[in-house]
Amino acid sequence: MTSFANMAADWNRGHGSVEDMLDVENKRLADNLATKVSRLKSLAYDIDREADDQNDYLDAMDSNFLSNTSLLGGSAKRFSNMMRSGRDNRRIMCYVTIGLVVFFCVLYYVVTRMQR
């Protein structure tokens, strides 16, 4: 057993104490951990900021949808009033409907030609 103690003493003299080596290793690992925690904190902050931005965007989109819904509701009400009112209005609505169908067909044709 004395030979083991002598070997440990010889090793300690040549390389420093085991406690010093463990202390250095612990400091290195603690610094490494602190760096990783700092990166995770920064990432969590970025995620939080992005979530807040997305929530603001969705709130704005919600208000836009509500205003468009009321606009379309009013248009549908005016359309139904016009359809109920008389024969001349029905003829005009038929022309408008045919015109819109033709317009969207032409628009579709132009868009598909531009993509080629």
Image (cartoon, rainbow, N blue to C red):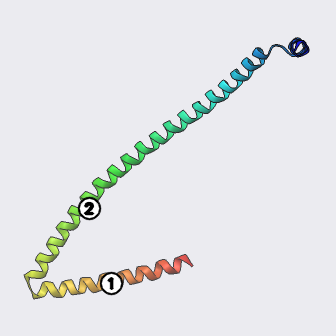
- Please tell me which residue is depicted at 84% across the width and 13% down the height of the picture: 16
Residue sitting farthest toward the left: 85
How crowded is the residue under tag 1: few (<14 C-alpha within 10 Å), some, or many (20+)? few
Using residue 81 as the reference point, say whether residue 41 is left or right of it. right
Q: Is residue 3 above or below residue 86?
A: above
- Nearest to the observer: residue 51 or residue 112: 51
Using residue 69 as the reference point, say whether residue 46 is left or right of it. right
Task: State if disc 2 and disc 1 touch (CB < 8 Å).
Answer: no
Decide which of tag 1 and tag 2 comes sooner along the chain. Answer: 2
* Foreground label between 1 and 2: 2
Q: Which residue is mark 2?
A: 68
Q: Name the mark on residue 101.
A: 1
Using residue 42 as the reference point, say whether residue 3 is left or right of it. right
Q: Is residue 1 above or below residue 87?
A: above
From the top left corner, tell me how far across and down residue 40 is, in percent: 56, 36
From the top left corner, tell me how far across and down residue 25 is, in percent: 73, 23
**Which amino acid type is shown beneath numbered disc 1?**
Val
Circle 2 SS class: helix
From the top left corner, tell me how far across and down residue 83 is, in percent: 13, 81
Circle 1 SS class: helix
**Which amino acid type is shown beneath numbered disc 2?**
Asn
Query: In which quadrant will I find the C terminus?
Result: bottom right
Q: Is residue 67 above or below residue 52?
A: below
- Nearest to the observer: residue 51 or residue 10: 10
Dividing the picture into quarters, in which one does residue 66 lie?
bottom left
From the top left corner, tell me how far across and down residue 42 is, in percent: 54, 34
Alpha-carbon span between mark 1 and mark 2: 22 Å
- Nearest to the observer: residue 104 or residue 7: 7
Q: Is residue 29 above or below residue 75?
A: above
